[in-house]
Amino acid sequence: MSALFRKAKQSRIFQDVVGQIQGAILDGQIKAGDKLPPERDLGEMLGTSRGTLREALRVLEQKGLIEIRLGVGGGAIVKNPGGKQITESLAMLIRSHKISLRHLAEFREDVEGTVTGMAAECATEDDIRHLKGLLKTAKALGEAGVEQWPEFMRVDEQVHMFMARISGNPIYEFILKTIHDNIHIYYDRYLPWGPKELNENYDDLCQLVAAVAGKEKKRAVRVARQHVRRFNSYMQKKKRNINKREYP
């Protein structure tokens, strides 16, 4: 492993140490499950003190690239690069209300419109069968009444997430999952739910699936954007009413 590293540049030694190790992991030169050399050996390869090296390793651990294990057999173990930190940062933005309903709607209109359009181009017969199965579940929950609204919304989320999966772009799937995992703080407070909203939501899902099944890209994009826009308008209206009551 010594061939992977060179003496760190003294003018920016800390950043250089982090950059070298991070680069080797992201480039696949060091694989998940591999153990980095002991601190003394790694410090010699990089020409840095153990204190600086330990600080660099802590940064890499915070980035989710390595795990520091203690005890016999421990050390710095390389992990699969993941999106945990990005997910947590975006989740905190949403949950701290730093992202408004308008921001979410603008983002979702564009992204979910694009994703659904891509799904209309890429969907296989198996994909369409799965979507129709989700529709069948949504219909049964809708017919059971508004008491099943939370379960219905979970199926609604599954439809949107499956569209992202069909698109074949893991970035869309990753970002939309983070959005859907955290948007419920807005749904719980601002989304009105009753027979009208439930029926409208189900009709939108039916139109989305029909457009994808029919390879109608433009229609799929239009329906997805209208769906986001309409339900955002309902939340905005309820939010204004709540604010009037709370801040007369």
Image (cartoon, rainbow, N blue to C red):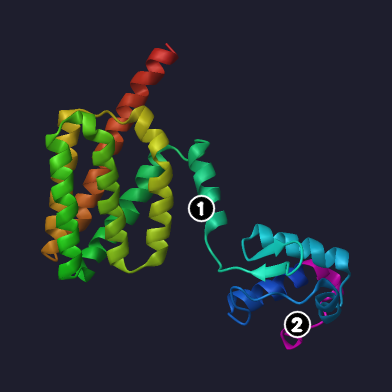
Q: Which quarter shows the C terminus?
A: top left
Q: Is residue 45 above or below residue 94?
A: below
Residue 29: x, y in percent? 62, 82
Disc nearer the start of the sequence (2/1)? 2
Q: How many marks?
A: 2
Residue type of the residue flagged with mark 1: Thr
Whether residue 216 is visible, yes or no, is: no
Disc 2 packing (10 Å; few <14; some 14–19; many ≥20): some
Farthest front residue?
72
Residue 188: x and y, percent?
36, 31
Dividing the picture into quarters, in which one does residue 129 lie? bottom left
Name the disc covering residue 87, or none: 1
Residue at 38% x, 49% y is 107
The residue at the point 66 percent across, 71 percent down is 22
Q: Which residues are magenta?
A: 1-14
Q: Residues within 10 Å of mark 1 (few under 14, many from 20)?
A: some
Residue type for callout 2: Phe
Was residue 185 drawn as part of the magenta stretch in this picture? Answer: no
Q: Position of residue 1 (x, y in %)?
A: 72, 85
User: x, y (%) of residue 78?
Assistant: 64, 70
Q: Is residue 6 magenta?
A: yes
In this rendering, the answer to whether 24 lies above or below 233 is below
Which type of secondary structure does the marked residue at label 1 adopt?
A: helix
Under circle 2, the secondary element is loop
- With respect to residue 108, does 119 lie above or below? below
Report the residue marked by disc 2. Answer: 5
Q: Tell me the distance, in whole angstroms, between the alpha carbons under discs 2 and 1.
A: 30 Å
- Residue 56 versus residue 185 in the image, above or below: below
Location of residue 8 (image quadrant): bottom right
